[in-house]
Image: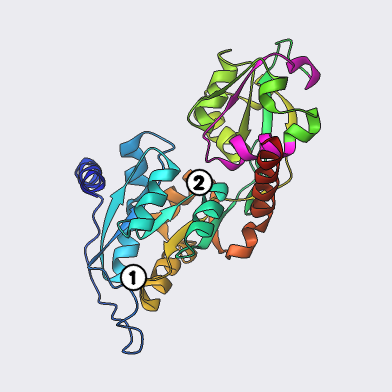
């Protein structure tokens, strides 16, 4: 995993995000032999903003995690959910943030990857209050694409193959709305790489429409690169649970509890106010694997459709 470590070191040097161990968390005698008690913890996320800014926003969180766990915290920022999963499966990454769909796939592959929390969103432009969000299909206001029917033969943007609202929902749920696979209905289907890039692509006319997450669209509005008044909302999904914060459940219990408390105890922490504001939240809430069963049902439906095609 040398390539992971090089990325981590670069990220830490860029923003100085390295927690200093302050207290020791020793496993109990009963589980000391069977649980993981690493000297340091690696925390991985997919960047959604400019890299250094992202690292600085997370610094109060990594500092708090260092204090509560008694471990040094390394920061790892790969370019895909798949890389986060790969790092967790190898044991290099201990704590991470995944998309709901990627989490279900990873948890099914190895139950060691377990969700423990997510954030409850504030009400935004498209985003509703609570620990859920929606996948929405948007087009540019003033364009001829004002209905789902008008998009037949058009160019549509998806985000990432591992995205729930930017790929899974469109392919499983929306395809039922149009009665066809996306590639057959639209003239061209492209992956943009992120919800933010999809939103901007719609506004700039690079794609005719795109599937984006409600809260990620709000991020683009906050940066002044789009507005709710500048797009047509042509379709939206049922609520989807927010991005799961996960850890390796093979870590010793005191470490897992400290990691969970790092996030669940952020509300009211002055130093974390900017971080919570960035994710448009005031608090984190506990989550369990069963809370993502809606995603498992979607995955089953998608897999069944693939088998039927064969």
Above or below, 189 relative to 40: above
Image check: 262 left or right of 192?
Answer: left
Q: Secondary structure at mark 1?
A: helix
Q: Is residue 65 above or below residue 185?
A: below
Residue shown at 52% from the left, 41% from the top:
162
Mark 2 lies on a secondary structure that is loop
User: Of 202 and 271, which appears nearest the observer?
Assistant: 202
Residue 15 in the figure: left or right of residue 274: left
x then y, percent, for residue 179: 80, 29
Mark 2 or mark 1: whose residue is earlier in sequence: 1
Please state the horizontal and vertical placement of residue 112, each as a whole percent of the image: 44, 65
Q: Dot 2, crowdedness within 10 Å: few (<14), some or many (≥20)?
A: some
Residue occupying image coordinates x 45% and y 67%? 260
Residue 165 counted in the magenta span: yes
Q: Is residue 96 magenta?
A: no
Q: Which residue bears the numbered disc 2?
A: 279
Q: Which residue is mark 1?
A: 68
Distance between mark 2 and mark 1 Cα atoms: 22 Å
Q: Horizontally, is 73 left or right of 103 in the view? A: left
Quadrant hosting residue 188: top right
Q: Would residue 210 appear left or right of 42 to someone viewing this image?
A: right
Residue 30 got which mark? none
| Residue at point 68%, 29% (across, down) | 137
In this view, 203 is above or below 295: above
Looking at the rendered image, the quarter that the C terminus falls into is top right
Numbered circles on residues, count: 2
Q: Residue at x 23, y 47 (%)?
A: 12
Outermost residue, bottom side: 29
Q: Give the residues in magenta.
A: 147-173
Sort mark 1 into few (<14), some (14-19) or many (20+) by Cα contacts within 10 Å. Answer: many
Q: Quadrant of residue 131?
A: bottom right
């Amino acid at each position: 995993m040398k390539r992971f470590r090089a990325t981590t070191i670069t990220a830490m040097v860029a923003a100085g995000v390295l927690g200093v161990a302050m207290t020791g968390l020793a496993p109990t005698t009963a589980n000391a032999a069977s649980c993981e008690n690493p000297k340091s913890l690696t925390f991985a996320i997919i960047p959604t903003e400019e890299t250094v800014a992202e690292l600085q926003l997370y610094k109060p969180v990594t500092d708090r995690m260092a204090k509560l766990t008694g471990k040094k915290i390394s920061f790892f920022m790969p370019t895909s959910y798949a890389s986060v999963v790969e790092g967790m499966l190898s044991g290099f990454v201990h704590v991470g943030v995944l998309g709901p769909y990627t989490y279900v796939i990873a948890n099914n592959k190895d139950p060691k990857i377990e969700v423990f929390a997510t954030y409850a969103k504030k009400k935004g432009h498209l985003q509703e209050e609570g620990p859920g969000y929606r996948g929405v299909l948007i087009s540019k206001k003033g364009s001829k694409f004002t209905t789902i029917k008008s998009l037949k033969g058009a160019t549509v943007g998806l985000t990432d193959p591992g995205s729930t609202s930017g790929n899974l929902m469109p392919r499983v749920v929306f395809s039922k709305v149009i009665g066809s696979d996306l590639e057959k209905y639209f003239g061209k289907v492209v992956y943009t790489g992120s919800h933010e890039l999809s939103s901007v692509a719609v506004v700039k006319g690079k794609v005719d429409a795109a599937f984006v997450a409600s809260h990620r669209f709000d991020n683009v509005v906050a940066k002044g690169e789009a507005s709710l008044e500048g797009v047509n909302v042509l379709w939206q999904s049922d609520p989807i649970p927010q991005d799961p914060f996960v850890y390796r459940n093979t870590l010793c219990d005191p470490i897992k509890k400290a990691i969970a408390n790092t996030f669940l105890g952020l509300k009211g922490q002055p130093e974390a106010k900017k971080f919570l504001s960035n994710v448009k939240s005031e608090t984190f809430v506990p989550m369990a694997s069963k809370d993502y069963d809606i995603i498992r049902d979607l995955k089953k439906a998608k897999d069944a459709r693939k088998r039927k095609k064969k």
